[in-house]
């Protein structure tokens, strides 16, 4: 099953109810964690150091009810030249389909990162503090001949020099469509 097919099964129904739900969601906004809350947490995450070399990642996509609708692995080849990085990701999904995404990252002096990729709309924005990294972007997601722009709010937490955990929430018009849970494992450490 290709990415658009699993999204069609899980996200299309959610997209059809979004318009009615958006008004209700706007009435009850809630505050979440901020990146500065992790400023003192260790080990300190340096994306240039962690995302350098070969990594393996293992993940699941869950729909709004929490049901796993897609499992996947990612082989990552990561390189940096100064403050410019390339993360070449090869996804293999549980149905045997594959996908490739190549991120071009830039580190800024204040701990911010920006990035682009072929299916990312505009520029991704991120911030690192302590052991955490928050990464936000809009992804173009093809579904049944149409392309939907969905937002991702990624939170990554460095556990040790080898393992990092990632939790990403996918939304459309502010309504939660699903979640990606991912573990990165750095090779050779």
Image (cartoon, helix red, strand yellow):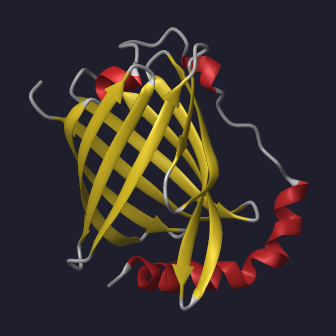
Q: Position of residue 64 (x, y in %)?
A: 55, 68
The residue lying furthest to the front in this view is 81
The answer to whether residue 6 is left or right of residue 186 is right
* Nearest the eye: 137 or 95: 137
How many numbered badges does the structure rendering display? 0
Identify the residue shown where x is 45% and y is 22%: 83
Identify the residue shown where x is 24% and y is 43%: 77
For the C terminus, give its image quadrant. Answer: top left
For the N terminus, give its image quadrant. Answer: bottom left
Identify the residue shown where x is 57% and y is 78%: 11
Q: Position of residue 95 (x, y in %)?
A: 24, 79
Q: Is residue 161 visible?
A: yes
The answer to whether residue 132 is left or right of residue 87 is right
Q: Is residue 122 above or below residue 8?
A: above
Identify the residue shown where x is 61% and y is 14%: 110
Q: Is residue 27 above or below residue 21?
A: above
Q: Position of residue 136 (x, y in %)?
A: 60, 44
The image quarter in which residue 20 lies: bottom right
The answer to whether residue 120 is left or right of residue 166 is right
The residue lying furthest to the top in this view is 40
Q: Is residue 69 above or below residue 138?
A: below
The image quarter in which residue 109 lies: top right
* Nearest the eye: 73 or 159: 73
Q: Is residue 159 visible?
A: no
Q: Is residue 176 above or below residue 98?
A: above
The residue lying furthest to the left in this view is 188
Q: Position of residue 104 (x, y in %)?
A: 45, 42
């Amino acid at each position: 099953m290709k990415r658009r097919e699993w999204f069609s099964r899980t996200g299309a129904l959610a997209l059809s109810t979004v318009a009615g739900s958006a008004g209700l969601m706007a009435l009850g906004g809630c505050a979440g964690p901020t990146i500065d809350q992790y400023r003192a947490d260790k080990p300190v995450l340096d994306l240039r150091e962690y995302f350098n070399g070969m990594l393996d990642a293992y993940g699941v996509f869950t729909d709004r009810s929490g049901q796993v609708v897609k499992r996947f692995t990612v082989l990552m080849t990561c390189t940096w030249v100064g403050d410019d990085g390339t993360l070449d990701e090869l996804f293999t999904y549980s149905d045997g389909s594959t996908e490739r995404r190549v991120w071009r990252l830039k580190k800024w002096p204040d701990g911010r990162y920006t990035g682009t990729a072929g299916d990312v709309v505009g520029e991704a924005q991120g911030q690192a503090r302590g052991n955490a990294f928050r990464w936000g972007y809009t992804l173009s997601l093809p579904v049944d001949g149409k392309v939907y722009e969905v937002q991702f709010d990624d939170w990554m937490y460095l556990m040790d020099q080898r393992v990092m955990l990632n939790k990403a929430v996918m939304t459309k018009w502010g309504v939660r469509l699903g979640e990606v849970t991912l573990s990165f494992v750095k090779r050779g450490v």
